[in-house]
Image (cartoon, rainbow, N blue to C red):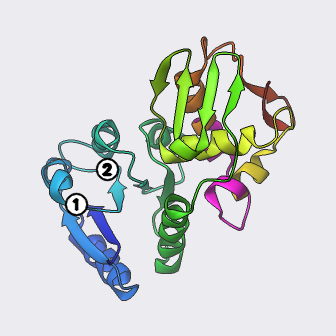
Amino acid sequence: MSTKVLVVEDDERIRTAVRLALENEGWDVVEARSGEESLQIFPDSDADIVLIDIMLPGIDGFEVCRTIRRQSDIPVVMVTARDDTHDVVAGLEAGADDYLTKPFAPKELSARIRALLRRVRLPTTELSNLEFGDLKILPDQGQVIIGDKATHLTRTEFQLLIELASAPGRVFSRDELLERVWGRGYFGDGRLVDVHIRRLRKKIEPEDAKPRYVITVRGFGYKLQG
């Protein structure tokens, strides 16, 4: 079956250009002109990935992303009109997996979508079940258990945890985690890693301000502490 992309964009010219670029890649496109319309469409859209413009009339892109994330762990790409740190971080904190800055080239958009979909569809790294204190990671089942309760992670958060767990105690640089988790083939945007680490800590740490498991090694990166 063809990949289906839900495009949430109020500017008709941009929405049409994105639709044509994606259809040229052989993908199906479902369009929404507002945040409200996207939330009506999403449950029955069968979308494989969602592309959301931040600046939408009515319900903005941040709230659309948060609402979708409460329902699904579908890959989400936020689109911002400028490379503004606040907008980028806020979009990622809302639950997005990646972001794009306007204007962007169709090839860049396609590359981001392919990278996200490839990660979703690849089998999990072959690892045995792992335990670190009260933290249990079950790679084959895609589950993380804290104490006796399962906690839900997005695919990106889970893959990030798996990469850290593949070598407990080893320090992974931001660039290395970008390459392993996002699969970009280029380096540079540590914000993706830092925000996802914060989100991960909120879900697995007893106190995310005083992490027990995912440790920052200042000047180097992150490690999973056994």
The residue indicated by pointer 1 is 10
Q: Residue furthest bottom?
A: 24
Q: Nearer the viewer, residue 219 or 73?
A: 73
In which quadrant will I find the C terminus? top right
How many neighbours does mark 2 have within 10 angstroms: few (below 14), some (14-19), or many (20 or more)? Answer: some
Which residue appears at 16% of the width and 56% of the height?
Answer: 44
Seen from the viewer's position, the closer of residues 114 and 52 is 114
Disc 1 marks which amino acid?
Asp
> What is the number of callouts on the image?
2
Mark with earlier residue (1, 2) = 1
Is 226 on the left or on the right of 3, as rendered? right
**The magenta stretch spans residue 184:** yes
Q: Residue at x 57, y 41 (%)?
A: 158
Question: Horizontal and vertical percent for residue 107?
Answer: 52, 79
- Relative to 160, 50 lies left or right: left
* Residue 129 sits above or below residue 122 on the image: above
Give the numbered dot on residue 28.
none
Residue at the (24%, 61%) spot, across then down:
46
Q: What is the x, y in percent for residue 26?
A: 36, 85
Dot 1 crowding, Cα within 10 Å, few <14, some 14–19, many 20+: some
In the image, is residue 183 above or below residue 34?
below
Residue 64 sits inside the magenta stretch: no
Secondary structure state at the residue bearing disc 2: loop
Q: Which residues are magenta?
A: 180-195
Which secondary structure lies at badge 1?
A: loop
Depth check, front residue: 211 or 81: 211
Could you tell me the amino acid type at mark 2?
Met
Give the labeled residue for mark 2. Answer: 55
Q: Position of residue 21 (x, y in %)?
A: 37, 82
The foreground one among 32 and 210 is 210
- Say whether marks 1 and 2 touch (CB < 8 Å): yes
